[in-house]
Amino acid sequence: MAWYIGRRLLQMIPVFIGATLLIYAMVFLVPGDPILALAGDKGMSDALHDQLVAQYHLDDPFLVQYLHYLQGILTLDFGTTYSGRDVGDVMRDVFPVTFQLAVMALIFEGVFGIGFGLIAGLRKGKIFDSTMLVASLVVIAIPTFVLGFVLQYVVGVKWGLLPPTVGSDVSVKTLLMPAIVLGSVSFAYVLRLTRTSVAENLSADYVRTATAKGLARGRVVRVHVLRNSLIPVITFLGADLGALMAGAIVTEGIFNINGVGGTLYHAILTSQGPTVVSITTILVIVYIFANLAVDLLYAVLDPRIRYA
Amino acid sequence: MREPTTRPDQHHFFADLDETPLLGVDAVDEHAAPASMWQDAWRNLRRRVLFWISAVLIVLVLAVAIVPSLFTSIDPNANDACDLSHSLEGPSAGHLMGYTFQGCDVYARVVYGARPSITVGVLTTIIVVLIGVAVGALAGFYGGWFDSLLSRVTDIFFAIPFVLAAIVVMSSLKAHRGVITVIIVLGVFGWPQVARITRGAVLGLKNSDFVTASTALGTTRMTTLRRHILPNAAAPIIVYATVALGTFIVAEATLSFLGIGLPPSVISWGADISQAQRNIRTDPMVLFWPAAALAITVLSFIMMGDVVRDALDPKARKR
């Protein structure tokens, strides 16, 4: 197991370097003046322009620029926002909010996705199953920002059941609706994954054996089918935690949540290019580590992986 | 033994099959059409209601995208298309969905919004499939250090969340916004999944007997890959591509919604939803129509991918 962890950690290094190099190249190697491009339509003063050129070492060759940037990441120096705050400090403030939102979304999609998926899988081909399959496709087809606005309007404004925006009041109640919106697409995937996995395992030999030796159906489902079916689902949920934190940009923007995504959303809208790059780098790092954690989790859950 | 030439559609599979069940199947299917994988899938598909619903929707959306003028007499791109005096007016004769805040006809904008979305979806899918199949097939077929190299490159692109990457790159490309830019950016970050699927399929096929037979007959490796392996690996790629087309349309709408996708000169559902959102409390229907068009378009593609996957996979079929 230690050997497996070591190998996975080593494999992460080229991925990390490649991913940061890719982001950096895509943002700073575009034709024209990258500083002016990052400033967008507003333009900027010559003094700020010169300062940014110096800050990003844009007079140096590309690889030297990149190494400066990499050095910044490794020393946890992510630069400052236009308003002069340290990006690292901003992240420390907003990260817990995003984490809470992502965990709530994860609980939502886990509980409802596995629940509905299990029932659909046990009743494969019946009306409940067919309805769930089509309904989950509809959920996947509705973009997050559309679902966000509709729920915000109907539940938040028209019915007044839940607060329509979050702002500075971060609690389970205010984050409930955003969490459902954020987790909706993954909820549909979890449902479909559980359903397929359960349906497949139901016809496995060990299930027939368990039934043949006289186990009650409830016990067969709980102990044998569900446990084996949940391995791919748990892996998906683990990977999704990283994806949810990285993907909360639109949701946090709509519900005015002061999280990582909301900060990124406002940085994009106000054309704060360097801040956008810094936050993205942090999110990619979170995403890579989340995937690593999932691989390790998978190796723990399924011993066959370790020896492959 | 039956001559293989009597079932020309199956020559890829012949070496794979055991003789006895083959004879058994032939005895039953003597007068029926030969059942290749795709024909078998088609027989299953044409009985599925969902297949016909999504097929009709896809044809309709494509028709709207190709000739929008057939569906509305109003050209929303004309200079006098919008009249501020109609701002947020409700539906009336000839203007079924009412007017936007700028006094433009909502129905005409919904109709003309199809083309940019479909263009981005279709062209991005083509780029993604071309890159992904090339990388995945070469990595899987040649193996060794070449496979390791290509797989690591795929991992790098895979490590960056797709929409996040598109948002960052598009926000720095604001000055060069356009349909082409969106397609290139989505294409550059969208191919790793196709590469992984292709590599897996090629790895599973390259030790098949029909590949050995082809090599033994003196076929070059490239030809074997192109003529024998890829056609048999096509099914999962086609299924993924159909679903991906829908997700690329969502990605474009999300970018346009954030104001970093298509430029304002191009009518886009995402941008229209973003505009309508400001008046959602008084006029929610202005937001509803482009959102519904977007969701139905995406749904038709992912539903098509889903039923085709079911039809190609006998295990997943309803019994």
Image (cartoon, coloured by chain):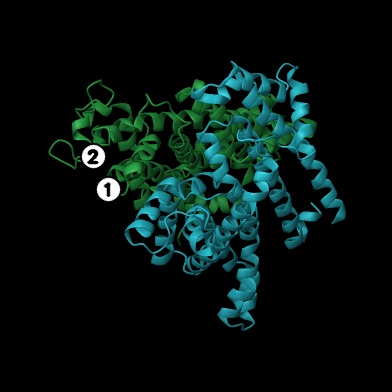
- Residue B310's tag is none
- Pick the residue in front: A144 or B80: B80
Quarter containing the N terminus of chain A: bottom right
Q: Are marks 1 and 2 in contact (CB under 8 Å)?
A: yes
Q: Residue at x 43, y 61 (%)?
A: A132
With A225 as the anchor, is B249 left or right in this view? Answer: left
- Pick the residue in front: B13 or B61: B61
Q: In the picture, one chain is cyan; tell me its letter.
A: A
Occupied quadrant, residue B218: top right
With B225 as the anchor, is A271 left or right in this view? Answer: left
Q: Residue at x 31, y 49 (%)?
A: B281
- Residue B282's tag is 1
With A232 as the anchor, is B44 left or right in this view? Answer: left
Q: Residue at x 44, y 56 (%)?
A: A136
Question: Disc 1: which chain?
Answer: B
Tell me the residue that label 2 is attached to.
B88
Q: For mark 2, does the 10 Å Cα neighbourhood hold few (<14), some (14 to 19), or many (20 or more) residues?
A: many
SS state under label 1 = loop
Q: Position of residue A18 (x, y in %)?
A: 73, 32
Question: Disc 2: which chain?
Answer: B
Colour displayed for chain B in the image of the structure: green
With B156 as the anchor, is B58 left or right in this view? Answer: left
